[in-house]
Image (cartoon, coloured by chain):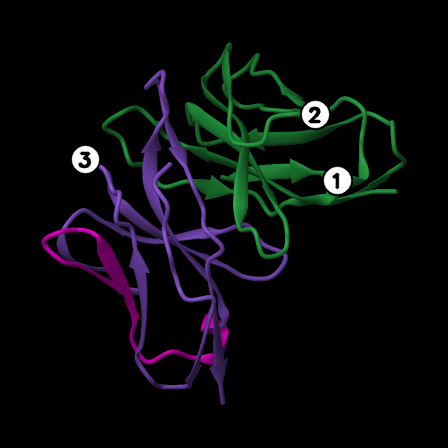
Amino acid sequence: LAKTTQPISMDSYEGQEVNITCSHNNIATNDYITWYQQFPSQGPRFIIQGYKTKVTNEVASLFIPADRKSSTLSLPRVSLSDTAVYYCLVGDRIPSGSARQLTFGSGTQLTVLP
Amino acid sequence: NAGVTQTPKFQVLKTGQSMTLQCAQDMNHEYMSWYRQDPGMGLRLIHYSVGAGITDQGEVPNGYNVSRSTTEDFPLRLLSAAPSQTSVYFCASSYSQGQEDNSPLHFGNGTRLTVT
């Protein structure tokens, strides 16, 4: 199974930019990289997805280098409400090939301080 | 749209009891899946379904059964509950999970299960 590695935790202050890097050395050629956010007592929520280079939406940016062995989620000007666990995912091919098995790692606990 | 709805929100079982966790989605998603989340271990895939009548095992299927008789519903059955199944269970769905598809997963808010 393709594995992802992220820092276990990060602290930041309100108004700062936060960058969370994920390594995925065994990413398959046609796999996308997807990031989710999870608040306590809630299910994960989709933030952003990309294949290569840079993707930006109203919430975050995603930077992916040419070799695609890592990716960086960038959250601009974080607030207290951005305190959450952030997961990086890549798809895994199961033997039968009928569907992708999405593997979640342990995620990164981001704590935003006042 | 309600999205993905899970019931119940909380449940306490005694060892050996059986129960069914319900999951329903109103987005006409083909793909549905069940994850369990334990402290420090992220989310682990239990079972998934790529459409009505089709199910398959994920990473940790032992002790759980699923069925998919309709597109909307994907119940998870615990056959004989064990303390090791104490966890938070999440149901998720997406438009498709074929080889070339990367549709994001939509998650419910989870069922917190305690087995004593």
- Judge the density around disc 1: few (<14), some (14-19), many (≥20) Cα neighbours within 10 Å: few
Q: Nearer the viewer, residue B57 or B70?
A: B57
Q: CA distance from mark 3 to mark 1?
A: 36 Å
Which amino acid, by three-letter code, is at mark 3? Asn
| Residues under numbered marks 3 and 2 in contact, where contact means CB atoms less than 8 Å apart | no
Residue at 70% x, 24% y: name it: B77
* Up/down of B105 relative to B51, above or below: below
Residues tagged by mark 3 and mark 1 found on one chain of the structure? no
From which residue to which does the magenta span run? A61-82
Pick the front one: A23 or B8: A23
SS assignment at label 2 = loop
> Which chain hosts label 3?
A
Question: Chain B appears in which tint?
Answer: green
Q: Which residue is mark 1?
A: B84
Identified by mark 2, the residue type is Gly
The reply to whether discs 2 and 1 touch (Cβ–Cβ < 8 Å) is yes
Q: Is residue B95 magenta?
A: no
Residue named by callout 3: A30
| Image location (x, y in percent) of residue B82 | 80, 34
Residue appearing at x 36%, y 51% in the figure = A4
